[in-house]
Image: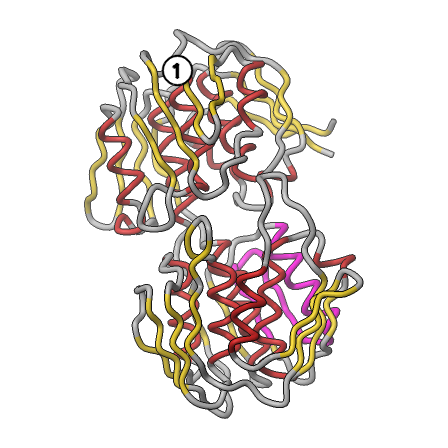
Amino acid sequence: MEKIIISGGNPLRGTVQISGSKNAALPIIAATLLTSEPCVIRGVPNLSDIQFMCDILRWLSVKVEHHKTEGVVEVRAGHPLGVAPYELVRKMRASVCLLGPLLARLHNCKVSLPGGCVIGDRPIDQHIKGLKRLGADVVVENGYVHARCNELIGNDVFMGGRFGSTVLGTANVLMAAVLATGTTWIEGAACEPEIEDLVNFLIKMGAKIKGIGGHMLEVEGVTELHGAEHTVIPDRIEAGTFMAAAAITGGDVEIHGARAEHLSAVRDKLEECGVTVERNNGTIRVRSNGDLKPVDVITMPYPGFPTDMQAQMSAMMTVTPGISVITEKVFPNRFMHISEMARLGADVSLEGASAIVKGVKRLSGAPVMASDLRASAGLVLAGLAADGETEVNRIYHVDRGYERIDQKLRLLGAKIERVAE
């Protein structure tokens, strides 16, 4: 086990390179199961979640070569097995997106339920409903989702749920539909950039899909797909995290590799806080003098403010004078980080799905415990702004979604180190 120790109070200055998107790479790697031909995925971040996905594919008798330093994953799914066991799937919820491609390719598969999640209930009922609409017989028994069919038949599928469209559910139905007979219309599809990236990869493999980037996807099924090469998009959440890090420390950071068009909601809220955000020649520059203004934030599905940036924005609001309100509309229980931020001196109270944040003059360092991926990022940001030393434990959470975050922050002038517990 390792932990991160931060000596806060240093404004971040310099440039940082954004890695490829974890949330785009995982379903794209799963999509390689749709063909027996070789696929090459580039720009893949070196993260524990990526390693878990590669391990699951190897368990399925798929040939996988993961070139970590080059950011390349090569896959050849000649004759994959149809069972993804709990021992591997439990490590990463995104592995549920194996269900669609395995069903499309084999017509019979069993994928373990991914289990609970600390950020709240995340059922896969929309996944199952969508696959049933395509003609699959799907049952949940003994902790596994067992899906089978003689063939998949195109149909209209509505993917909207209680808290908006499901991203992984959209990915699962989409990957099943590309090999279905006839045409599928996916209504209420998630339109996150990661879904658009998956669509672009599937089209390179020979899929016929219309409506890229929208809430209505039209998929004309084909009999087979072929191998392809693809480079995943930059990680918009990592970029947003460094934007917030520059703001909370009163820094000046130039972010390379990010796509500004994927970060409009984050940019808008930072500017509302009094932060300067400039877009120039493919880079994003974020400057702050530390004089922040309170703001109200409501998380929503894309293109709204991302739920995956809620903890980072919460950290920023803890040192913003006045009262800010952060309302969580995607995962209403996603406030596990609040009690830990209180250990640093934050003044935050919860009222239903909203956090009422009263800004304090300063935070003070203390030991804190990360509960999930984005909560850990929020605690790191709070530590960057705190006086004294902050110790962030359970940092395996942050390693699931941030490639070398401590090294990147150190290059920007942060006093941060990773040590063994």
- Quadrant assignment for the N terminus: top right
x and y percentages locating residue 98 in the rendered image = 61, 68
Q: Is residue 411 magenta?
A: no
The residue under label 1 is 319
Q: Please tell me which residue is depicted at 47% across the width and 21% down the height of the picture.
A: 384
Instruction: Establish if 172 lies above or below 375.
Output: below
In the rendered structure, the answer to whether residue 290 lies left or right of residue 96 reads left
Quarter of the image for residue 5 reads top right
Q: Quadrant of the C terminus?
A: top right
The magenta segment: 48-75
Count of marks, rendered view: 1
x, y percentage for residue 7?
53, 16
Answer above or below: position of 305 versus 154. Answer: above
Residue 250 occupies quadrant: top left
Graded by Cα atoms within 10 Å as few (under 14), some (14 to 19) or many (20 or more), the crowding at tag 1 reads many
Between 350 and 72, the one lying in front of the other is 350
Left/right placement of residue 399 relative to residue 320 reads right
Q: Secondary structure at mark 1?
A: loop
Residue occupying the far bottom of the picture: 223
Q: Whole-percent x and y of residue 206?
A: 42, 85
Q: Give the percent coordinates (x, y) of residue 285.
A: 26, 36
Question: Which kind of residue does numbered mark 1 sit on?
Answer: Val
Q: Residue at x 62, y 21 (%)?
A: 368
Horizontal side of 122 relative to 330 (left or right) equals: right
Residue reaching furthest to the top: 361
Q: Residue at x 52, y 76 (%)?
A: 133
